[in-house]
């Protein structure tokens, strides 16, 4: 497997990332609603780090292999966030997302001092569910009509992982 570097993404990465997402639409549908424009993506990446942390996963050659987001960060006694992630064509299926997610979880529980990371995955997205389970996430429940994606309210399975459970055995 090739080496992977994880780096924070910001508004200056929006154009490159938008092009990579556009080239990966078939891989992402029907699981996500991709950003509609570079400006929409730039605004998302400009959110303050106390609300959103976005990381790009790059190969040694500099190719963007995927993205991992820690969003809806809640501090205080909760120290919680939501996890979202996606691979990018043509580098999917090579174990890079697992390696990148592990690095971002190290940052989430270490540098960012989060206690809990939650992931919500549509039941039919078996690859994504398998990925979080391999990283130690546990299934906590099912949420009917949880998120609106592609104009439809879609069910999601709810997974979570706490700092005490990381790293996974």
Image (tube, helix red, strand yellow):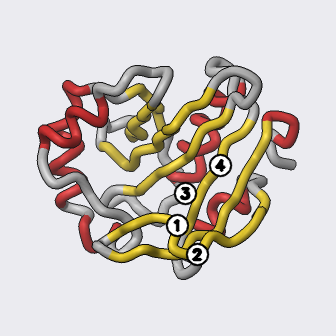
Query: Where residue 140 appears, x then y in whole percent?
Result: 77, 62
Residue 154 versus residue 7 in the image, above or below? below
Q: How far apart are the two marked residues, 3 and 4, measured between alpha carbons?
A: 21 Å
Mark 2 neighbour density, 10 Å: few (under 14) some (14–19) many (20 or more): few
For the image, the number of numbered tags is 4
Q: Secondary structure at mark 4?
A: strand
Q: Are marks 1 and 3 in contact (CB under 8 Å)?
A: no
User: Residue 129 occupies which quadrant of the picture?
Assistant: bottom right
Q: Are marks 1 and 2 in contact (CB under 8 Å)?
A: yes
Q: Which residue is mark 1?
A: 146
* Frontmost residue, 75 versus 63: 75
Q: Which residue is mark 4?
A: 118
* Frontmost residue, 94 versus 121: 121
Query: Where residue 41 appears, x then y in whole percent?
Result: 22, 41
Q: How far apart are the two marked residues, 4 and 2, measured between alpha carbons?
A: 16 Å
Q: Which callout, 1 or 3, points to the residue nearer the camera?
A: 1
Horizontally, residue 87 falls left or right of residue 11, namely: right
Please report whichever mark, 4 or 1, sits nearer to the chain's N-terminal start: 4
């Amino acid at each position: 497997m090739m080496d992977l570097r994880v780096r924070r993404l910001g508004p200056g990465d929006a154009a490159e990332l938008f092009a990579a997402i556009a080239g990966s639409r078939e891989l992402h549908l029907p699981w996500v609603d991709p950003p509609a424009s570079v400006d929409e993506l730039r605004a998302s990446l400009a959110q303050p780090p106390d609300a959103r942390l976005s990381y790009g996963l790059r190969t040694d050659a500099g190719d963007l292999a995927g993205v991992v987001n820690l969003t809806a960060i809640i501090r205080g006694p909760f120290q919680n966030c939501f996890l979202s992630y996606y691979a990018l064509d043509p580098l999917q299926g090579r174990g890079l997302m697992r390696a990148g997610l592990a690095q971002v979880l190290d940052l989430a529980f270490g540098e960012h001092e989060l206690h809990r990371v939650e992931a919500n995955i549509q039941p039919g997205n078996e690859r994504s569910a398998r990925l979080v389970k391999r990283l130690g996430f546990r299934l906590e429940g099912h949420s009917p009509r949880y998120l609106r994606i592609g104009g439809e309210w879609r069910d999601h399975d709810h997974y979570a992982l706490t700092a005490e459970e990381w790293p996974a055995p």
